Amino acid sequence: MYANYIKRPLDFFCALAAILCLSPLLLVLTVLGAVKMKGNPFFTQPRPGLNEKIFKLVKFRTMTNQCDKNGNLLPDDVRLNAYGKFLRSTSLDELPELFNILKGDMAVIGPRPQLVRDMVFMTPEQRMRHTVRQGLSGLAQVNGRNAVTWESKIAYDLEYIKNITFLGDVKIILTTLGKVFKRDGITEEGCDTATDLADYLLAEGRITREQYDRGQAKAKKLIAEAF
């Protein structure tokens, strides 16, 4: 009953209430982001959602668009400035996703939307995580966030979709707030950003370079077809 009929309307009203209450903060971060990032303060990226339908996730930008002399983007650790690190450590960069929830692309709680290039490297069983709306936070986030392995992350996602309850979602929300205040599990140890699934599998020797390149090409095709 909750998962099928109550969760979506409740998500809509919770997102709307949060946007109204946080509108002054959203305005400040928008202006501040435009200054700190020297341009557009928002970052959008295609992500697979419910039933693998690709949508554009929106966040506050945490990395600049600095390029080298050849026009190529500089490494992540160079483009991730102090303001961006602050947004990530406090999870304030996630606030614009409230509009994704309002639109119906996402839920308050559910598996976190991963990259399209991550999805194409998941097994059929792992891709079952897309049978529900992706969430602002989820079971994997309260059990280590980006500090856990890909296998554990997806296992938590699959565990969540087997038993979606109101009390379970409330517990995840409260635990998420606690972790945000503690700034716990934001990134992998020694990394500024989380490792993509394909890069992880390639580094572990579980896919070949040919499989890696083929998967990346497939992801690009899916995004092009979606938009």
Image: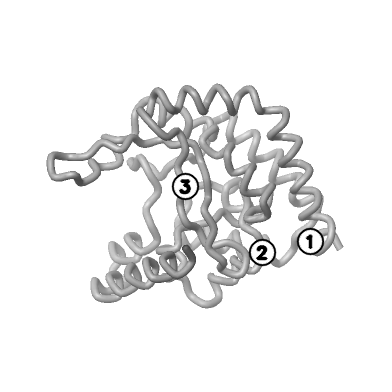
Instruction: Quarter of the image for the N terminus: give it.
Output: bottom right
Q: What element carries label 3?
A: strand
Task: Determine the residue positioned at 45% across, 27% down.
Answer: 33
Rounded to the nearest angstrom, the CA distance separating label 1 from label 3 is: 28 Å
Q: Which of the numbered marks, if any, corresponds to residue 3?
A: 1
Is residue 14 positioned above or below 54 on the image? above
Locate residue 222 relative to residue 26 in the image: left or right: left
Query: Percent x, y for residue 120?
Result: 43, 70
Q: Name the residue under label 3.
A: 44
Locate residue 19 relative to residue 4 in the image: left or right: left
Instruction: Report the amino acid beneath label 1.
Output: Ala
Instruction: Report the amino acid beneath label 3.
Output: Thr
Query: Percent x, y for residue 21?
Result: 72, 28
Q: Which of the numbered marks, if any, corresponds to residue 60?
A: none
Is disc 2 in contact with disc 1, using a CB cutoff of under 8 Å? yes
Is residue 128 positioned above or below 62 on the image? below
Instruction: Report the amino acid beneath label 2.
Output: Val
Rounded to the nearest angstrom, the CA distance separating label 3 from label 2 is: 21 Å
Give the mark toward the camera: 3 or 2: 3
Task: Determine the residue positioned at 80% across, 48% down.
Answer: 10
Task: Determine the residue positioned at 37% across, 72% down.
Answer: 218
Task: Determine the residue positioned at 45% across, 56% down.
Answer: 149
